[in-house]
Image (spheres, grey):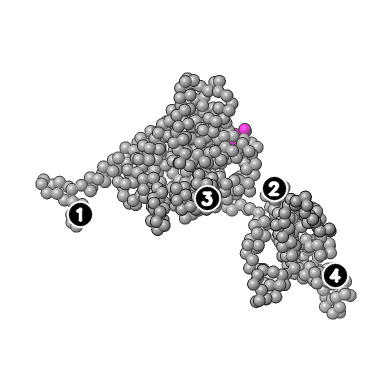
Amino acid sequence: MDHGACSVIYLDRRAHPERLRRDNVLASLNARDARQVQAQSPGYFNFGKSTSTHEVLSNVETLLSIFTEIDVHRSGSAALDRIWHLYNASSSDNAPIIVLIDLPYDEERRMKRLSREPRTPSPTATRTPGQDQTEPEDLYGMHLLRHISAEIQDRRLPRIVIPIILLSGLDYEIAPDSSSPGPNGSQVLTDTVRLTRYLDAGAVDTLSDIEVSPERRKQIAAAVGTWAFSAHDWNDDELLFGSLVMIKHALSMPEVERWRMGEDELLIFLQASRSAYNEFVLYHNFRHVVDVLQALFYFLVRIGALPAYPLDSSSTPVEQPPIASLLKPFDSLTLLISAIGHDVGHPGVNNAFLVALNAPLAQLYNDRSVLESFHCAAYSQILRRYWPGAFEDVAMRKLMINSILATDMGLHFKYMADLGNLQEKLAHNNGGIDGWSPKVLEEYRDLICGLLIKCADISNVARRFKTAVQWAAILTDEFSNQGQMEQELSLPTCLFGGPPVRDDIIKLGESQIGFMNIFARPLFESVADILPNMRFSVNEIIENKVVWQKKIEEAKERLLPKLDGAVGTSILDQARN
């Protein structure tokens, strides 16, 4: 490989610091081979004779057989200085910088052992004199690997830096009698937990291209701004692009400038979020997430909490009721971020199933909002790594948790009661919020956010009928799968209304109408009462209910005997004919 293609830094405390070129070292090797006496050979291979340096020399020789030049260092600080020097010197051509970091196997085990020792000894505890339990002052091994990876993640170091661990102090001779990983056995190479930790610590996220044609980009960018949007019309990459469009629109508000990221970083965040959803789950997957995100996006634009979409549209400014003015740009952005992670890691079963099964997740969260609590915790780790600005903001994190927990249908009637109280309070104050204390305003702000994401989460029944019926069929399949698991485990049904019946239009229609009457319509009507621009959703629900009733009647007519005078023909007879 041509040296100009990349730079190589090799860090090893046993090494002699020097910049080595292949042609110079080859001369040293030739002289050594000719004389058969290493001690009299000039150059790098004369710096040491011990067993420990033999491994260093072997590594150097291997590296120089591949690269024309390597920088050898003994300290992490020197290696970091060299990284910066190389980056500044090659900023124009962005040549990769490979950093090979020595990690002694025994040292890694020693640090692991020290981590188990008491951090706060008792006052009477004795300490062996001369025992050093402090961390090394100089960055080295895993500490240096994590440091470089963090610097790259935080964009203080460029992504062209590639840190790699070299595990040293191993005997690669085959040791069949060795039953556990150790310096004397080759089984250490099969220690997948340790190897995975090394790979993960040095992993730096890179952008994977999304394949969306320019024409489809235009189409989905237009679709996310309409209530006719159907997540079923787009593939995964197109849905991800649509999510990017909506988040970028929210971030265009000057009030949220501090949370902005570049498009590449946003794409990586969205890809990481998408990968956290289980593909085997039929309904609660990334497609559902984008559907909820788009519904919430449309609601926020509709009530004036987000700018008109698209930005260059000539639509008239939205007239906001006083209660809608509680939602600031910060709240709108937080709601959209919450929507992306509100079902992360969903297993395809509901809370009641996990509680009845006494699943570890239910035990962890004390049987309360089990999945929603899990989604919050899992999503926080995604944000910590891919959107640290959102993760570190206490106010944003608090509102995000509140919003995701609001999607627990077990809390539905509590939210409805709180919404009823808000309606009464607004009615007594002529629809205004004047005179309300800051604490009360904040509580109602949180309530409005929770209600909006609840509406978005169950907005399937308020979509155009063609889209609504697709969602209904998919959700029925997911519930049916849970019903089968309940039977196999001899559990009582944990599904509201019992396990659904597949391919039964009458049962499907009745369940949809029941859900509308009990949950969706009261919620959307009450929300529309305080946010009038949400009234369109109530109209959609009413229209869908009429269509479902008609479908049920038609299906029942097909099951009834056909009267031809006094002779009746049953559906069985029709099948026979």
* Residue holding disc 1: 572
Q: What residue span does the magenta drawing correspond to?
A: 251-255
* Residue holding disc 3: 363
Please provide percent x and percent y for residue 498: 36, 48
Please tell me whether residue 57 is drawn above or below residue 354 in the rendered image: below
Please provide percent x and percent y for residue 230: 44, 44
Asked if the residue under mark 3 is in contact with the one under mark 1, i.e. CB atoms within 8 Å, the reply is no
Residue neighbourhood size for the residue with mark 2, other residues' Cα within 10 Å, grouped as few (<14), some (14–19), many (≥20): few
**Which mark identifies residue 155?**
2
Q: Earlier in the sequence, mark 1 or mark 3?
A: 3
Name the image quarter holding the N terminus. Answer: bottom right
Disc 3 element? helix
| Residue 252 part of the magenta-drawn span | yes
Q: Which label lies toward us, 3 or 4? A: 3
Res. 189 in view: yes
Q: Earlier in the sequence, mark 4 or mark 1?
A: 4
At horizontal 64% and vertical 72% (from top left) the residue drawn is 179
Mark 4–mark 1 Cα distance, whole angstroms, equals 94 Å
Q: Which label lies toward us, 2 or 3? A: 3
Residue type, mark 3 in image = Gln
Residue type, mark 2 in image = Arg
Res. 238 in view: no
Residue type, mark 4 in image = Gly
Asked if the residue under mark 4 is in contact with the one under mark 3, i.e. CB atoms within 8 Å, the reply is no
Task: Judge by depth and name the residue closer to the eye, 344 or 329.
Answer: 344
* Residue holding disc 4: 48
